[in-house]
């Protein structure tokens, strides 16, 4: 799936109450896994692809304090990368966070 900066990636079911942004790379297996997890929960997310976009990557690093992708925000809260997202899901905290 090709993404455009600022475009919304639509998953099978749309959750209008949750604002999710993921900075990613098209060639990153962790980005793909994080998007699969969000998709499995039926969530829509705003994907910002940083490939070949040093200004966007710098913006992401400034906001997240990390330069690796993916970097994920849910309802304005930085949750971290793929491993962090998976840990939140396994602990049950992701669903709580998504509920608002």
Image (cartoon, rainbow, N blue to C red):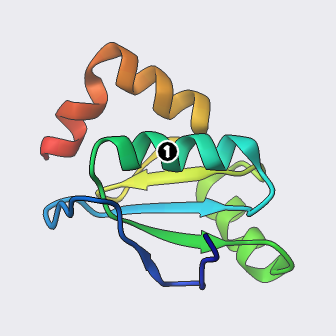
The answer to which of 34 and 64 lies nearer the viewer is: 34
Q: Quadrant of residue 13?
A: bottom left
Report whether 81 appears left or right of 67.
left
- Tell me the residue at 27%/25% (across/down): 93
In percent of width and height, residue 15 lies at 18, 60
Quadrant of image for the N terminus: bottom right
Circle 1 SS class: helix
In percent of width and height, residue 50 lies at 74, 72
- Tell me the residue at 74%/43% (across/down): 29
- Tell me the residue at 39%/49% (across/down): 39
In percent of width and height, residue 11 lies at 34, 61
Q: How many marks can you see?
A: 1
Instruction: Identify the residue position indicated by label 1 in the image.
Output: 36
In the orientation shown, which residue stands out farthest toward the top?
91
In percent of width and height, residue 83 lies at 59, 28
Using a 10 Å C-alpha cutoff, classify the residue at mark 1 as few (fewer than 14 neighbours), some (14 to 19) or many (20 or more).
some
From this view, report whether residue 12 is shown above or below residue 36.
Answer: below
- Tell me the residue at 59%/37% (across/down): 82
From this view, report whether residue 41 is shown above or below residue 69.
Answer: above
Report whether 38 appears left or right of 24.
left
């Amino acid at each position: 799936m090709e993404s455009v900066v600022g475009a919304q990636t639509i998953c099978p079911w749309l959750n209008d109450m949750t604002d999710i942004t993921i900075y990613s790379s098209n060639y990153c297996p962790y980005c793909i896994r994080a998007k699969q997890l969000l998709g499995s929960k039926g969530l829509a997310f705003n994907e910002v692809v940083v490939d070949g976009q040093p200004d966007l990557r710098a913006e992401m690093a400034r906001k997240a304090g990390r330069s690796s992708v993916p970097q994920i925000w849910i309802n304005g809260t930085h949750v971290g990368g793929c491993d962090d997202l998976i840990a939140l899901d396994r602990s049950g905290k992701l669903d709580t966070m998504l509920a608002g």
